[in-house]
Image: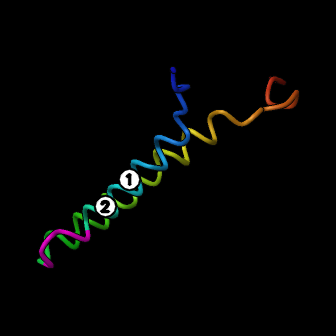
Amino acid sequence: MNKPYDLEERTFLFAKECRLYIRTLPKTISNIEDGKQLIRSSGSVGANYFEANEKLGNQGFII
């Protein structure tokens, strides 16, 4: 049984796993700042993928 390559789901799970990982880190100043950046960047991966796959429509092709 082959599982389809669902990149939208995988990017969501990646962001979720990053958040779970951050919770395990000690609460140091550097970990807090790096954790904030990891949360932002891991979430933007899925958002960028979703936006890139949106249908542009006819107006997107007019130059």
Residue 37 vertical placement versus 26 (above, below) = above
Residue 25: give x, y in percent of width and height.
16, 69
Q: Residue 37 carries which label?
A: 2
Residue at 31%, 61% (x, y): give it.
Answer: 37
Magenta stretch in the rendered image: 23-27
Based on the picture, tell me whether residue 46 belongs to the magenta stretch.
Answer: no
Residue 46: give x, y in percent of width and height.
51, 46
- Asked whether the residues under the numbered discs 1 and 2 touch, taking CB atoms below 8 Å apart as contact, a structural biologist would say yes
Identify residue for label 1: 41
Q: What residue type is labelled 2?
A: Gln
Q: In this view, does 16 lie to the left or right of 33?
A: right
Query: How many numbered marks appear?
Result: 2
Residue 62: give x, y in percent of width and height.
84, 24
* Type of colouring: rainbow
Residue 15: give x, y in percent of width and height.
41, 53
Residue 26 vertical placement versus 44 (above, below) = below
Depth check: give the residue in front, 8 or 49. 8
